[in-house]
Image: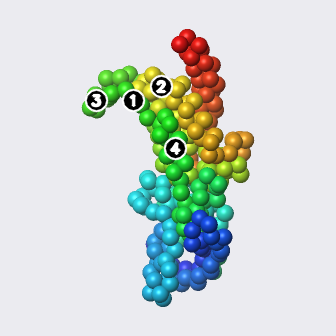
Amino acid sequence: MSNHLTNLTLRVWRQKGPNDSGHFEDHAIEQISDEASFLEMLDILNERLINDGKEAVVFDHDCREGICGTCSLMINGQAHGNQRGTTTCQLHMRKFKSGDTIVIEPWRASAFPIIKDLMVDRSAFDRIIESGGFITAPTGGAPDANLIPIPKPVADSAMDSAECIGCGACVAACPNGAANLFTAAKVSHLNRLPQGQAERYKRVEAMVETMDEYFGSCTNHGECEAACPKEISIDVIALMNKDYRKAKLKNRKDLSRT
């Protein structure tokens, strides 16, 4: 495959801190290989800025393999860009044409305050996980694969939910800034497995109500599923809502017995 070189204009959001109003800054960047990833292109931009004695653009990144979920960018108004099922670090410059202007912004959600430039604070997700995204049963070492019989459809659906990398694209894409897809994926992963049954209703109640403290409400736009780099289905939201309704009834009954 031939290696084409692309000339681009980058319109990048710059913001010194949470209390700064922020602004867009334009940069012409030339001779970018179409084999470069989007983050590699930003690395090149930063190298040039530093060589010119300017401040580099701050952005989140870690694994660069589509696993960690930190590469959270709005690219031309779309979370992670226009290629479905792809994180920003997996997006390559061959998806753009020479002469394009690319608008690069941070996640836009009140629950994700901007730290600097393209980096946001996603610790609201941590609060949701801390409230119930775990099991307390001692599981010991890894058991034999067939020791606990789990129907394959259940195992498959739990693993589908476990694919969530917590990037926040669902929140950024949602017009309400809702985190229902993220929360539902984390709830469904544990609530479908035998090890998660003991705390099933306590878990879903705690996680949903913690979510409601920080994020907006889901109105079934479906933008979250479209933006999710792991293509997690909004079916998990229905399962979470079902468990939450049961939890409110069950937990109320349990409380009345004490």
Residue 2 x/y as whole percent: 47, 76
Q: Which residue is mark 4?
A: 127
Q: Can you tell which of label 3 and label 4 is closer to the viewer? A: 4
Label 4 – label 2 distance at C-alpha: 18 Å
- Is residue 93 found left or right of 142 in the rendered image? right
Q: Amino acid at mark 4?
A: Arg
Residue 215 in picture, x, y percent from top left:
64, 46
Q: Which residue is mark 1?
A: 136
Tag 1 near tag 4, CB within 8 Å: no
Q: Amino acid at mark 1?
A: Thr
Spatial CA span between label 3 and label 1: 11 Å
Q: The disc labelled 2 sits on which kind of residue?
A: Glu
In the orientation shown, which residue stands out farthest toward the top?
Answer: 257
Q: Which residue is mark 3?
A: 140
| 15 and 7: which is toward the camera | 15
**Which residue type carries mark 3?**
Gly
As helix, strand or loop, the secondary structure at mark 2 comes to loop
Which residue in the structure is indicated by mark 2? Answer: 199
Q: Judge left or right: residue 144 versus residue 72.
A: left
Q: Nearer the viewer, residue 46 or 58?
A: 58
The answer to whether mark 4 and mark 2 are in CB contact below 8 A is no
